[in-house]
Amino acid sequence: MKVKMEVADETALGDGPRRAYERSPVTDGDGTERLGALWNYLSSWVAPDGGIHGPVVHRGDLKRMFAIHDTAWTQQAVIEGLLFLYRRSGNDYWLRWALRLADAQCARQDGDGRFRWAGHEDDRYSSLVHNTLADCALLDTVAVLQEQGDAQRRNRYLAVVEKNLDDYVIGQLYRPALGGFAMNPIDYYAGRDRFIVNMNSVSVEALIKLDRQRGTTRYARLVHSIGERIRSLQARDGLCQGSFAYSHIEPDVHVSLYTAIAVRGILGFAELTNAAVWSDIARGVIAFLLRVEDAETGLWYHKVEHDQLCRFPLFVAGAGMICNGIFDAAQLTGTKLDAQSLAARLLRYQHRNGAIRNFIGYDHPDNGRRRGVGTDCWEDIYPTPSWNAQAFHFLCRVLPPPEPPLPPRRSRTLVRSRRYLYLETRRYSAIVGVRPLDRGIMAVYLKGLRHGLVAPGRHMIVRAAVKMLMNLRSGRAALRWLRRWMSRRSTSLASE
């Protein structure tokens, strides 16, 4: 099934509207040059072993800033993007890079089948979605290797995927009571098992693709039962109609990005069953994402919670996943799609080094910061590979492939204001955040290493020191005495 596209004039990509949020100059050039610039940025973070390093800044002040090892979330998106470029251009340059990154992902498998460093912002996790996204990327690579006749590497990748799905995903994460998979052996965030729709949808995609490569229907019954569970969690009315609840215990939380990710499995269900119901479900997703478009930025509201729109933080580079969901849903339903317009929404926020900023409105009450007002902060403008990989994945589907070898980009990018300073070259990356004070940071990364030099802001240092003191009996006593002394002092001053 082909997508009907209304392709805009590609030169318009260089003339996108300048928003108040754009503190940095936007790179010039057409879509091909811009995609090449993004690849130059991502490839600068690739370590000698093929892992894409980089810190992680997630929504809700969840971060991994010190350890900057690769993660399946980043690795899979870049692999799939490179495979798109290879298929569309026929140039082996892109395939060689994809295989290098896929080899690195295979090397991350532990003895029990799980992938190491598959927790995004939290290394306690080897979560369902990160493992199965990696499986999907490896299985897409397997399909290309079959065409290439590389049986040895193809069989190695298949063995890795099979071990991950059988021993870890099914062996450790399947919960009959949920009707699907839990996100992790222990859900540290919720404290209980959850059926998370987008994660189970991606797991279904992986199971269907493995069955297809093996020529079997081994997982068909499991896939069908999870499909019915996913269908039951799609909203039928109201503002959220067409969206998916985040999980079965959070039926009133609908996050735009996660609804878009859920489309991945819907494509698999449609191919497997040929049932029209899945087209209707995809049509509902498109309608929901249209309702939550942000008119000012061209991006998408963060979520709907208890029928209330929560605008911030807006995903920018990460919105590539929303674009992919729209693209896939349009493919399934035959909906007309202006793919170049979707690409332009991301590229208008591109820095001169090719990277795309992470967020808009990170410092806002919608993101859990009670005193925030939505003014740009360092978390907004600082680009990280984990989110830029998602933009790359989508843009590789719709922009003309660059012609390698790619010309070198600007050697240094500098973005600054009174609240932050961002500096990056191909060898290092640095971010200084001054405001808000309690979220300040100074971090410097040498891109070949797995750890960075990170110092939190002064308020964070004070809070950490207080926390350490509170862990000591003498420290707790000293802090109680200090509070009593300050209370007496303030009373004395008031009486004077």
Image: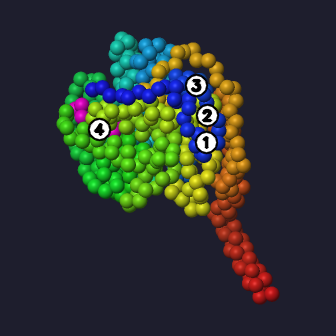
Residue 326 image-quadrant placement: top left
Residue 222 image-quadrant placement: top left
Specify whether residue 8 is in view: yes
Q: Nearer the viewer, residue 68 or 13?
A: 13
Kindly identify which residue carries mark 3: 29
Could you say whether the residue bearing mark 4 is in a helix, strand or loop?
Answer: helix
Residue 19 is left or right of residue 168, and the answer is: right
- Circle 3: residue type: Gly
**Residue depicted at 51% across the width and 44% down the height:** 297
Q: CA distance from mark 3 to mark 4?
A: 36 Å
- The answer to which of marks 4 and 2 sits earlier in the sequence is 2
- The answer to which of marks 1 and 3 sits earlier in the sequence is 1
Q: CA distance from mark 1 to mark 3?
A: 17 Å
Could you say whether the residue bearing mark 1 is in a helix, strand or loop?
Answer: loop
Q: Main secondary structure of the magenta part?
A: helix
Residue 274 is left or right of residue 133, and the answer is: left
Region in magenta: 263-272
Kindly identify which residue carries mark 4: 266
Between tags 1 and 4, which lies in front?
Answer: 1
Q: Nearer the viewer, residue 402 or 188?
A: 402
Could you say whether the residue bearing mark 3 is in a helix, strand or loop?
Answer: loop
